[in-house]
Image (cartoon, grey):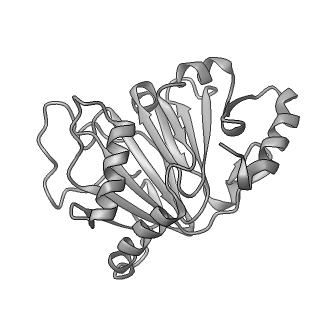
Amino acid sequence: MACGGVAHLCRHLKMAGGAGLAVRTLSGCSWVRGSGPAVLNRLRDEAVLRPGFLSRAEEDTLTSELEPQLRRRRYEYDHWDAAIHGFRETEKSRWSDASQAILQRVRAAAFGPEQTMLSLVHVLDLEPRGYIKPHVDSVKFCGSTIAGLSLLSPSVMKLVHTQEPEQWLQLLLEPGSLYILRGSARYDFSHEILRDEESFFGEQRIPRGRRISVICRSLPEGVGSRRPGEPPPAC
């Protein structure tokens, strides 16, 4: 895969490689960086990033379908569990055929054949100044796998080990990318979306704009589908 719009970022990170931070290279570009080789190896298959998972046309398909529903809602600054600031959200179970085909691709890429996806897909719209605080999704609402599509704006997701905060990972979430959190990345690391003033990937500034994420989750083990009206997790 060609580096495209982040070629300058790849070159920058290669030059910064001697600064004591480990950088994992994906298909010639660096979209994942961590505190050291140990955390990169530990999360190699558990914090997965697929840049360019969506084509531009697929991004437009999802955005166009979501805009009318999101436009009817106001941005909020007080989430039920205090995890999100500057957001509006909704949940969808009915999609156009084109969007359903995209979600089927997410299912195939992120979830095992033995896993059941929650029927309600969480759609989270962050304004340019919005952010998601560090949190671990409740096991009441989410199973072992979380998969999210990023639309409109790049952002930086940071994972930090809940017991060993010196162990961390950053994912550069470009529009059209798919991230997958499972296993230890899901349960042992908090995750967050950095606010605009903190939005750096290494030394590279990643300006924040409006960001929409489309988030699929596996069903919690031994639990039926979440009932309508129950609050979704943060991200």
Point out residue 131 in the picture as x, y percentages from the top left corner.
53, 59
Q: Position of residue 54 (x, y in %)?
A: 49, 54
55 horizontally vs 109: left or right: right
Q: Residue at x 60, y 22 (%)?
A: 39
Q: Which residue corresponds to the image point at 61% horizontal and 34% vertical from the top-left?
A: 169
* Relative to 90, 6 lies left or right: right
Residue at figure coordinates x 68%, y 27% from the top left: 35
At horizontal 44% and vertical 39% (from top left) the residue drawn is: 180
Where residue 36 appears, x then y in whole percent? Answer: 69, 23
Q: Where is residue 177 in the image (x, y as percent from the top left)?
A: 53, 50
In the figure, 207 relative to 174: above or below? below
Q: In which quarter of the image is residue 143?
A: top left
From where the camera sits, is residue 233 visible? no
Left or right of 87: which side holds 12? right
Q: In this view, does 23 lie above or below 71?
A: above
Q: Which of the image's four quarters has the N terminus? A: top right
Residue placed most toward the observer, 20 or 4: 4
- Residue 141 placement, left or right of 50: left
